[in-house]
Amino acid sequence: MTVILGISAFYHDSAAALLVDGEITAAAQEERFTRKKHDSGYPALAIDYVLSEAGLSLDQVDQIAFYDKPFLKFERLLETYVAFAPKGLKQFGMAMPVWLREKLFLKDQLIKELRKLDKQFDAEKLLFGEHHFSHAASAFYPSPFEEAIVLTIDGVGEWATTTVAVGKGNKLDILKEIHFPHSLGLLYSAFTYYTGFRVNSGEYKVMGLAPYGEPKYKDLILEKLIDLKEDGSFRLDQSYFNYATGLTMTNRKFSDLFGEPVRKPESFQLTQFHMDIAASVQAVTEEVVLRMTKSLAKEYGIPNLCMAGGVSLNCVANGKILRSKSFKEIWVQPAAGDAGGALGAALSVWHKELGKPRKVNSSDSMKGSYLGPLYSQQTIEEELASCGARFSSVTEEEMLEQAAQALADGKAVGWFQGRMEFGPRALGGRSILGDPRSETMQKTLNLKVKYRESFRPFAPSVLREDVAEWFELDGDSPYMLLVDQVKQERRRQMSKDEDQLFGIQKLNVKRSEIPAITHVDYSARIQTVHQHTNPIYHALINKFKEKTGCPVLVNTSFNVRGEPIVCSVKDAFRCFMGTDIEVLVVGCCILNKKMQDSLLIENYKEKYKLD
């Protein structure tokens, strides 16, 4: 037996992943255990979990792989400050003590932490991979393809911001790179900052805001900020940005270009200007990736595309890549960000360093990305009792019946089943569910359950066998990473007055038979639910279909704004008691809000920092 532990840490979204004889056994982000959103610390609890899932201790691990190379990052930092000198002196002065005290000696820090679990830990077991190779490995090795182009795009790793690799069998080779400071991820983050959202957290809000606007500034961005070539390669004009040497993403020249200052977070209302800015950077991002993928398909003649890196979570762009038909099939790593780097680092050791063959699994090597903790029915009942919860334990059939009926009655249902998801999406393991036919569900979930901005859309979970009857997509999208349109015949014809509405005014217009998941441009971020990867969730949607004729549910992550997705039974109960979720289903336990002790109600609206 060969055991490999992968670790990502010390930037954002720390995580651990475990391979046993090349099989993905367990993976989880540290934030789920610490309850600290995007936790970047050493993932001690995630490591404890993945080892316990396999029934192993650290001394039984053969290799430990870290997802990037700190010395190369330090080299980039120094060279950047020298290249831009004397600009950036303040940031240089702030960064250097941290690097010299902590990050430059990261290997020693890792060894020290690992020896807390194994006093005899051999430092020779610890290997360091390159950031973008870890991303590429996380995308290609679990994919259902024998051969593929592998595209990774994010903010920045050591030097690379974009890479192109070719994978075949167990071989994976990076062939092209774009280097810092030229970064599509950082361009998108600059606009995230400019529109008043948090960098490395709020990019998906920009994507969700974009359909409310018009891409009025697309040409200006392409003319001034990014020199985009026909093959998708690009360079950014650094005179508009501050991220290389400053403490902000953009500078005054950037604000002057668009005619408004940086929006302060939560300080004033989002306007049509911000919606148009969001639409514009989204359009530019799509233009870049579409040129890039079209060029790569033509150059290499390989029909399959794999993707990872933070930009690969832009599911709107992913959907357009698929519809462009440059590639026959695309597969995106569900933990595409830095958390997935832990898995990629481990897979790199297994296949690249140890030369182990690769078994292509056409069904799902990621096991639906259900790689986190699982709770037995007995443990669930004990945990709920210790919380003071009032619940009834029923058979699985009765649980499905009651949950489906609650959904059909228009109630918000907390759904806690099976193993927790790895990656940023709730996929029916730790979800809040609702009836997509409801005209008020989208607003209710945003304002009364999630405590977040009203404009943000929700995703549909749809039975895989029924997806083509409700959406333009006719294929797999198990990880909620592809956006496509609601089927034409399911849409509602807009009146002349409704067509002329602008911005957030569009929000309250019913657009289809399933308005709660239909965005203002008729799009939806689709999750296809497969019986072989999540039979219990598949059964629930089937039961809802029997009652309503609709094989779709609203699915959003089980948390409030600023909170990590719930991990434990106690997390779920606390969130249930701190929101307007009306029914909680945990395993085969049913909880109704009206039956709970009012003294256990929590104020979740103020509990977490805004994301």
Image (spheres, helix red, strand yellow):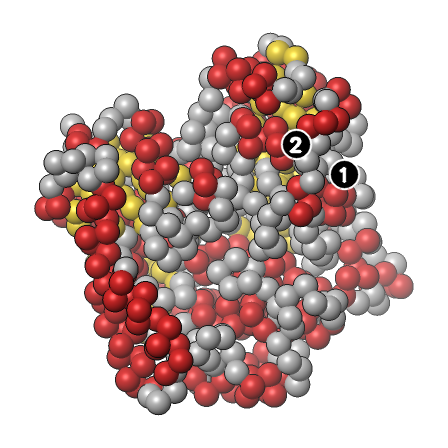
Q: Nearer the viewer, residue 582 or 219?
A: 582
Locate residue 384: give its quadrant: top right
Label 2 vs 1, first from the N-terminus? 1
226 on left or right of 295: right
Callout 2 touching callout 1 (CB < 8 Å): no
25 on left or right of 71: right
The x and y percentages for residue 461 are 60, 38
Q: Nearer the viewer, residue 122 or 180?
A: 122
The N terminus sits in image quarter? top left
567 on left or right of 142: right
Q: Does residue 383 lie above or below 118 as drawn?
A: above
Q: Does residue 481 lie above or below 364 as drawn?
A: below
Give the labeled residue for mark 1: 437
The x and y percentages for residue 368 are 44, 35
The x and y percentages for residue 299 are 31, 68
Q: Nearer the viewer, residue 190 or 288?
A: 190
Amino acid carrying label 1: it is Arg
Taking the image as drawn, is residue 11 in sight?
Answer: yes
Amino acid carrying label 2: it is Phe
